[in-house]
Image (cartoon, rainbow, N blue to C red):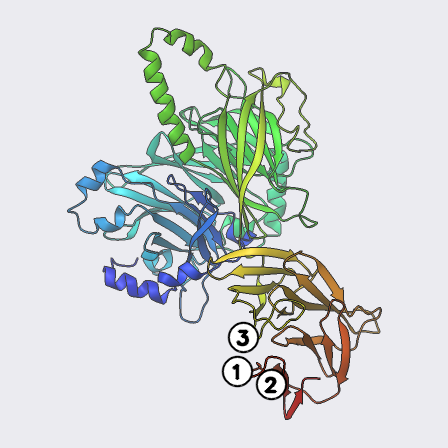
Amino acid sequence: AAPAASPAARSRGNAAAGGGSATSTMLPGPASRGNGGCIDLSTSGLLAHGAGSSVVVSDPRSMQLVCVLPMPSSSATSPASFVTAVRWAPAASASSLAAAEDAAGAEDDHRPLRLAAGDRHGRVAVWDARARAVLRLLSLDESRSVAPGTSGGVQDLCWIHHASGWLLASIHGPSLLCIWETSNNPRVLWMFDASPEYLSCLRRDPFDDRHLCALGLKGFLLSAVPRHDSDISLKEHRIVCGAGDVAELQRLEKDISAPAPAPALAAFPLFAARLCFSPLWRHILYAVYPRELVVFELNYSIALSVATLPRGFGKFTDVMADTDLDLLYCTHADGKLSIWKRKEGEQVHLLHAVEELMPSIGTVVPPPAVLATTIWQSESIFRNIDKQSQDLAHMQSSQSMIFDTKSHQNMYQGTMTYLTSISEDGKIWSWHLTFDKSVSSKKINLGTSNHSDAGTSNPRSNGLDFTIKINLMGQLHLLSSTVTTLAVPSPSLLATVARGGNNPAPAVPLVALGTQNGTIEVVDVLANAVSVSFAVHSSTVRGLRWLGNSRLVSFSYNQVSDKSGGFNNKLIITCLRSGLNRPFRVLQKPERAAIRALRASSSGRYLLIMFRDAPVEVWAMTKNPIMLRSLALPFTVLEWTLPAAPRPSQNASKQSPTSKELFGCRGYCCRKF
């Protein structure tokens, strides 16, 4: 394990790892399945999720990107690996802060924004998100003195409390559970190998900060509590999985996706097992497997109820418990969100409503997958304070008994819940759920879901009827795919608005990015945010250029697979003002050469199209582009020159020869036509 470092050493290490002020101007790429759906929301309302080899920190209230924390590279030659787990450290209490003021190294353990992130190389970085600095870099391979990659990647993380402070629990590889000391002397305190089980999920008990549970893909459930003598109290349980899930896992084991010691998310990327503790009922936890929702009681080690996957739904991917209401939120592989209500007097949950986390209107086909979802905890804190204040006022009132009898009936009235979801197209969605008492009972539509009738109550719930309405409150758009090309507006003083003119245009702090999935992202450099996104091509954007300040021209191509061969070149003009995409130079047959590059003049009036081993075409980019000529010269490199600005003393009606647009190539120079 890495020894404790001084603040100066940490600053130097963070600068080498790409931290510091550079992270404030970094725009992250999209999350992918390789990130394992890792997401966590702090009690202060900051969202952290893995996107490639970085941790993205954002504010879901204002839909603003806060910072990007890139994982340090394991060596100078190897790139940083995918982030697979993130977890915010719980906030330290005022008493613990006062007691630790004089302790050595307390400034690390009690920082308000500590964030742990694990990657596929098996390393865990403990960040100070406020300073954007790595406080600790934990490596299990170094602690065990084994070869790099032997311990396996990180599957999940969880903070638990101990007499000495907060400890970090982690799952490495398929079955290794570790507990780390991350303060003065970082080291592994305890390890437990649960093989041949595949551990999938770690969660902390909300009623006991010392208690955590680890869930396996085969139904193995481990309960652990650290003791004062640096030992761990363990108890093993078994959740009986359905026959369908067992058969699917056995089939996947025969054709495993990644060799050992790969964690569960790499070995079985399409088989998920998740759990969460009930925030209202002690010793009760909820576990989901692809086809089952299980309510489990820890004291008696028994499953109280099992709900099977409804027809027409994708497999279960995660489960979340509402912090105020007896409701469960389950996400599904097809982007649905199912809401389950507890039956009164029993630990049985019935399906109450279903919603879509990926709208069917305005998205591509097939729609992007929903990778992760989390429920807001900060809203519950404020509601509990308000509820306790009202209860105190009711106790002091002579009409307290009247309020108590009506409290259960109005439990859902006016209640709100906030959810945040991450989709694979680089978007962060903020959802607002409201619960209102329904006037009449309606049958729930389990096959389809829309925002008008999906929230109707289920008459089988045997409780208070209420409706659920979901609304999209905000969206943060990050990069949707891997960037393949980049273009900036011309810096020339004569660069004008679209469609020509002699008036100089103001400087526009925009950058256009072409991506691998065919979209064009226009980025505001000053705000470090994606201003607008256009779905332009059906394949990779190969080249991109600005035409003035409000139009873009881009191209893509695909190779024909039949005997004749050739390439289908596709050129499109995108208007940033109207959002329209207009193709030009549309041919009926494939061409023998693919487009190599585009070169636009500084004013955007003319465009050069370069082909591989073919003549260069010169186009006038009017409202309907016109090809002016074809230049059959042996060009290898070609670019327009920037025209010089005319002097103020010159007559405006007489155009200076120096202001003419030129383009040069290897051994040639051609004047504007």
Q: Nearer the viewer, residue 371 or 429?
A: 429
Q: Nearer the viewer, residue 374 or 85?
A: 374
Classify the position of the C terminus by image quarter: bottom right
Report the residue marked by disc 3.
493
**Dot 1: what SS?**
loop
Q: Nearer the viewer, residue 64 or 279?
A: 64
User: On screen, 553 above or below 601?
Assistant: above
Q: Amino acid at mark 3?
A: Leu
Report the residue marked by disc 2.
656
Residues at circles 3 and 2 in contact by the CB criterion of under 8 Å: no
Q: Mark 1 packing: few (<14 Cα in 10 Å), some, or many (20+)?
A: few
Q: Amino acid at mark 2?
A: Ser
- The CA distance from mark 3 to mark 1 is 12 Å
Q: Mark 3 packing: few (<14 Cα in 10 Å), some, or many (20+)?
A: some
Q: Mark 2 packing: few (<14 Cα in 10 Å), some, or many (20+)?
A: some
Please identify the quarter of the rendering in which residue 660 is found: bottom right
Going from N to C along the chain, the mark reached first, 3 or 2, is 3
Is residue 106 found left or right of 126 in the rendered image? left
At 23% from the left edge and 37% from the top edge, which residue is drawn? 94
Residue 142 visible in this rendered orientation of the protein: yes
What is the x, y in percent for residue 492?
A: 55, 76
What is the x, y in percent for residue 269?
A: 57, 49
What is the x, y in percent for residue 414?
A: 50, 24
What is the x, y in percent for residue 657?
A: 61, 87
User: On screen, 516 above or below 179?
Assistant: below
Residue farthest along the left direction in this orientation: 102
- The CA distance from mark 3 to mark 2 is 15 Å
At 71% from the left edge and 72% from the top edge, which residue is drawn? 621
Classify the position of the N terminus by image quarter: bottom left
**Dot 2: what SS?**
loop
